[in-house]
Image: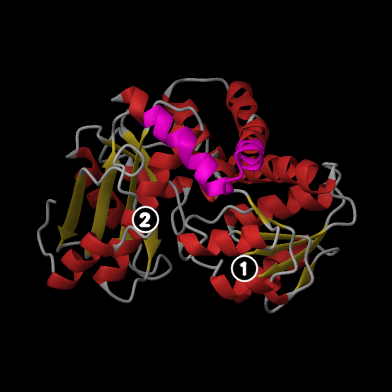
């Protein structure tokens, strides 16, 4: 761990934060590197976590969020970077897992100089970590970060990139949902199905567009009033509610922050399928046991939301956009394989997905 200013609380979280830890390190290897970044002139406080580079450089977005404490930021970046290892491995990409967080409110603290300073820190890792957009950051921000490093994806088209990864992320969730629908209801037809989209930011809006186009009824919730207003103006046929989790749903699609699928929700939800774009959706491994006992199908988040990292990887590899989209659409088959493996082996979907990850990481070693 490289740090300019760390705390005992942050160290404690580093030791305890992996809620899905597994004694077999081929399934859940420890983090390789955690870097604390400070720049007094711009006020930058950032943390970069490189979880695993067995398959390739660690690629993952930079999230900007007003964490209440540094320990919260540490916990989040460790969980997110670990999830990126699983996501890239399960998607068949030659990438490792990494993530970064910038502590601060993007509407208040984000400045061009702060982003440039952050880019210079990314550059010190020499390509072990490649950053991209995430919650609180945009393709325009990646252009500014790119002034300090070449290790950045999802820049604007004008800046030489492919733009925001949200459309591809949403597309991957949509196709993963189709795979789940086929297995739960015997048909991928979503006409008349009620889907609760929690979080109508960059990805949630794109997913809602795909769902309404497929004939689904969309309920949406978001604590941010401007996001709700923009959503309502765009989707007259959808309905804004206070809490989609308590609604009568066929599908619950968490697309905001993680940790919304609790044991309570698992025991009470009316949804037959949970499939969304949020990372780290389950609060603990026991949640999936509750879902399984009730017959609720959960598509593991790092399977469903891999569209963004596929786009970022394709951008780095000079793929065509068509090739990248084909890879994202193929998440339907990957999700279906996970669900079929879980059914045939009588294990949870999460365990089935982890088998794929463990095999790829083991082969890499």
Is 59 placed left or right of 45 in the picture?
A: right
Image point (13%, 65%), residue name: 6
Q: Position of residue 200 (x, y in %)?
A: 63, 62
Residue 159 appears in the picture as rendered: no
- The Cα atoms of the two marked residues, 2 and 1, are separated by 21 Å
Is 304 placed left or right of 46 in the picture?
A: right
Q: Is residue 121 magenta?
A: no
Disc 1 crowd, CA 10 A, few/some/many (<14, 14-19, 20+): many
Q: Position of residue 253 (x, y in %)?
A: 66, 58
Tag nearer the camera, 2 or 1: 1
- State the extent of the magenta-drawn residues as a range: 338-361
Identify the colour scheme used: secondary structure
Secondary structure mainly formed by the magenta segment: helix
Q: Residue furthest bottom?
A: 242
SS at mark 1? helix
Question: Quick check: 197 above or below 182?
Answer: below
Q: Residue furthest left?
A: 4
Q: Is residue 358 magenta?
A: yes
Earlier residue among tags 2 and 1: 2
Q: Quadrant of the C terminus?
A: top left
- Report how many numbered discs are placed on residues in the image: 2
Image point (27%, 49%), residue name: 49
Comparing 39 with 113, the one in front is 39
Question: Quick check: 201 above or below 169?
Answer: below
Disc 2 crowd, CA 10 A, few/some/many (<14, 14-19, 20+): many
- For mark 1, what is the residue? 266
The quadrant in which residue 208 appears is bottom right
- For mark 2, what is the residue? 79
SS at mark 2? helix
Q: CB atoms at circles 2 and 1 under 8 Å apart? A: no
Question: Quick check: 346 above or below 289?
Answer: above
């Amino acid at each position: 761990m490289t740090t300019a200013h760390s705390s005992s609380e942050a160290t404690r979280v580093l030791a305890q934060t992996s809620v899905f830890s597994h004694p077999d390190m081929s399934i859940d290897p420890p983090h390789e590197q955690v870097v604390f970044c400070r720049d007094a002139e711009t006020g930058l406080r950032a943390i970069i976590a490189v979880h695993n580079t067995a398959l390739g450089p660690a690629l993952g977005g930079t999230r900007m969020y007003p964490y209440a404490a540094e320990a919260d930021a540490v916990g989040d970046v460790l969980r997110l970077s670990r999830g990126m290892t699983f996501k890239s491995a399960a998607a068949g990409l030659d990438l490792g897992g990494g993530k970064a967080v910038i502590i601060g409110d993007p509407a208040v603290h984000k400045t061009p100089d702060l982003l440039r300073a952050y880019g210079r820190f990314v550059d010190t890792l020499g390509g072990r970590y490649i950053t991209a957009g995430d919650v609180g950051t945009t393709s325009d921000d990646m252009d500014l970060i790119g002034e300090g490093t070449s290790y950045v994806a999802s820049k604007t088209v004008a800046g030489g990139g492919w733009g925001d990864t949200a459309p591809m992320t949403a597309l991957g969730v949509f196709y993963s949902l189709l795979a789940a629908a086929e297995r739960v209801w015997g048909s991928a037809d979503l006409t008349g199905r009620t889907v609760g989209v929690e979080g109508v930011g960059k990805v949630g809006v794109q997913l809602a567009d795909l769902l309404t186009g497929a004939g689904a009824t969309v309920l949406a919730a978001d604590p941010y009033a401007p996001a709700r207003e923009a959503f309502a103006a765009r989707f007259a046929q959808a309905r804004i509610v206070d809490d989609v989790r308590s609604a009568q749903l066929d599908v619950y699609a968490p697309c905001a922050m993680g940790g919304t699928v609790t044991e309570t929700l698992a025991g009470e939800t009316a949804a037959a399928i949970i499939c969304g774009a949020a990372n780290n959706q389950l609060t603990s491994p026991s949640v999936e046991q509750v879902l399984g006992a009730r017959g609720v199908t959960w598509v593991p988040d790092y399977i469903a939301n891999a569209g963004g990292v596929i786009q970022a990887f394709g951008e780095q590899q000079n793929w065509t956009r068509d090739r990248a989209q084909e890879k994202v659409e193929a998440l339907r088959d990957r999700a279906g394989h996970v669900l079929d493996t879980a059914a045939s082996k009588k294990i949870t979907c999460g365990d089935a997905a982890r088998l794929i990850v463990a095999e790829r990481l083991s082969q890499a070693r």
